[in-house]
Amino acid sequence: MKKFSQIIWMLFFGLNLSGQSSWIDSLYSNPFFPTIEDTVRVIGEIRTSSAGCELSSSEILINELDKEIEIFGCYAIGPLDTICPSIDTFLIGQLQEGEYNVTLTSKVFETITNPNGDCTNSISETVKEIEIKVSGTNSIERIKKELINFELINNPVSDYAKFKIDSSEEDLRLIIVDNFGKVVIWNQIERNYNKNRIIRIDVIKFPQGIYFCYLENKNGKSKPIKMIKN
């Protein structure tokens, strides 16, 4: 009976492993329009078909000469069949002016059959590419960054954060970063011809701590607002 149970257990995991996969929902840079003065981060939204989806290790290769950036993420997943989202931030740093091709390669290994986390024996691999255009900067561009009128109405926050935006631009993003530099919110804001807009963001699941919020447009970003989550 014990041997029969072991066979069923192996068959269960074998069937499970055969259907495991990962994919990259989105890939973008933070800031979205960086300058040579900005610290660039790349954010990847990765999903796997099994629970866990923990980023076990990562590697970043930057070729400034050829304007190529390669990112490798190694993800550990368990045997439970359920869609698992993972939002990960990869620190690139300051870049020279130019257009960069960025490639994220997401590899997956199963923790039961590969407990050492060797991604050379991955069971799934997904690749996604984007381009990042890094521009030069000067005093005029710095002034443009500060022209976005943006404020947090309630601070500290508990259940939600309420922002007032004095801009009718169509290409705006609201970004919230935690104290470790990880992007936790990245929202595209729909165009509204009423300049004075109120945006409400649910933060009830945010851990207590300090966050930094800013708006970004094609000219740059606003000054960050320090947000305290109770």
Image (cartoon, rainbow, N blue to C red):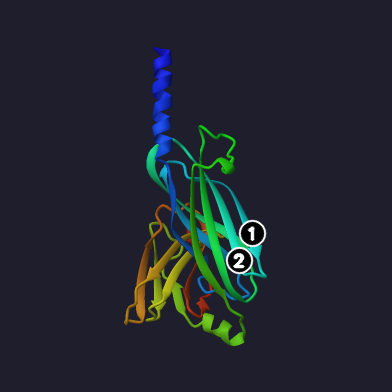
Q: Quadrant of the N terminus?
A: top left
User: What residue is at 58 percent from the left and 79 percent from the top?
Assistant: 135
Query: In the picture shown, does residue 126 fall above or below 115?
Result: below
How many numbered tags mark residues here? 2
| Three-letter residue code for mark 1 | Leu
User: What residue is at 66 percent from the left and 65 percent from the top?
Assistant: 63
Earlier sequence position, callout 2 versus callout 1: 1
Q: Secondary structure at mark 1?
A: strand
Asked if the residues shown at circle 2 and circle 1 are in contact, with their CB atoms under 8 angstroms apart, the answer is yes
Query: In the picture shown, does residue 22 fall above or below 61?
Result: above
Q: Based on the displayed image, in which of its 4 quarters is residue 142 positioned?
A: bottom right
Q: Is residue 209 left or right of residue 98?
A: left
The span from disc 2 to disc 1 (Cα, nearest Å) is: 8 Å
**Numbered badge on residue 225:** none
Q: Is residue 138 left or right of residue 83?
A: right
| Three-letter residue code for mark 2 | Glu
Q: Position of residue 16 (x, y in %)?
A: 40, 35
Q: Badge 2 local density, few (<14 within 10 Å), some, or many (20+)?
A: some
Viewer can see residue 225: no
**Which residue is at the front of the view, 137 or 6?**
6
User: What residue is at 42 percent from the left and 13 percent from the top?
Assistant: 2
Viewer can see residue 28: yes
Residue at label 1? 61
**Which residue is at the front of the view, 58 or 38?**
58
**Which residue is at the front of the view, 31 or 45?**
45
Q: Secondary structure at mark 2?
A: strand
**Which residue is at the front of the view, 110 or 230?**
110
**Numbered badge on residue 68:** 2
Q: Position of residue 128 (x, y in %)?
A: 48, 59
